[in-house]
Amino acid sequence: MSLAPSLLLAASGLVYWAINSRSSTRKKVVKDKTTQTTPTVVLNDTQALINKLVEYKKQNPAFTYVIGVDVGATNFRTAFIFTNSNNVNSTFEIKLQCRNMNFFRNFYAELGEQIVKSIGVKPLSSVLALAGPIKGDCVEITNYDEGARELFVSELTDLLFPRGKTKFINDLEAACYGIISLGVEKKLNDFMASLWLPNEKSNLSVDLADVSCKIILCMLTLLDAVLSMGTGLGVGIIQFSPSFEGRIKYKPLALEAGHCLIPFPASGSAFYDRDVARLRYLSKKLYNSKYGVEYEDICSGRGLQYCYEFELTQLPNYKEGDILDILSPGESMLLFDLLTK
């Protein structure tokens, strides 16, 4: 099940931080328990989005809205979260493909003009969760086309991204906020399943009711790793700092650990020759043999594909082509045996 809608809502919730912050200290946001949320409406194109927003305005003359954008290395999603006078949230989401920032800037410039012309209202604030390192008000999307990877906040149209009320955060930082929100609301099991033990608990569900538990936890800083595999490999950390009062402070930490180089295999390994051949194959496929292989070159959509392709080269009578076209049922079993040896 995709976490994208939950992550977008969690990320867009940070707009309250963007509105209220006057220093580097982030204010604690207390969720209004009277707020109701309707199911997210996912739309396929901008005209459908405009039509929905116009329809919403007719039904709700008084409203405010914020924007959350989830920018991956292949796709980007935009969520418009509206709140009417009855404190009911309605979310409209649109998804498009993008590989460079020139398209990104132009898309929002045109969309901003259409939206403000149609409903006559600008967003209160906006937040963008982006798949790349952020330095101040600049981000570089690592896997975008070379020469079109950088984006500054000031380059975005203020019709959708108000000056002083627009925030860049790392996409895995946004994922961490989303997971924290799900954990606090005890909804993690609705979206995730334990990989190992059926009743294993995350630090997000630690019970501080027991006094002895409090004493032990106060001496520790607990960590949960968050990994997201897509076009690349996103990595984040959630830090937990419990207190004697039974409260836990959550702090997301964005990393770019997916770009760490994979260490060269040990020469004494029984799989040395095979492992070296695999790394050489991936390096040639991805970088024309000019660079080493990163963790995300294996733990990603393209990485899995190329790893399977490498295993195909080990089959008898190998012929180059698409994996699904090449494999017969018998060869599928042989490939499975190769992968599980």
Image: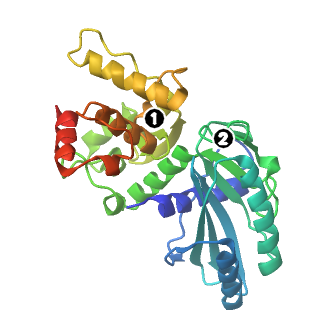
Contact flag, marks 2 and 1 (Cβ < 8 Å): no
For disc 2, the marked residue is 145
- Asked if residue 138 is positioned above or below residue 284 in the image, the reply reads below
Q: Residue at x 16, y 37 (%)?
A: 337
Q: Is residue 154 left or right of residue 72?
A: right
Q: Residue at x 66, y 55 (%)?
A: 127
Answer with the quarter of the image where residue 163 lies: bottom right
Q: Is residue 161 visible?
A: no
Taking depth in this image into account, of 217 and 298 the one nearest to the observer is: 298
Quadrant of the image containing the C terminus: top left
Residue 39 x, y percent position in the rendering: 49, 76
Residue 161 x, y percent position in the rendering: 76, 58
For disc 1, the marked residue is 296
Q: Is residue 166 left or right of residue 259?
A: right
Q: Is residue 106 visible?
A: yes
Residue 208 x, y percent position in the rendering: 32, 48
- Asked if residue 292 is positioned above or below residue 295 in the image, the reply reads above
| Distance between mark 2 and mark 1 Cα atoms | 17 Å
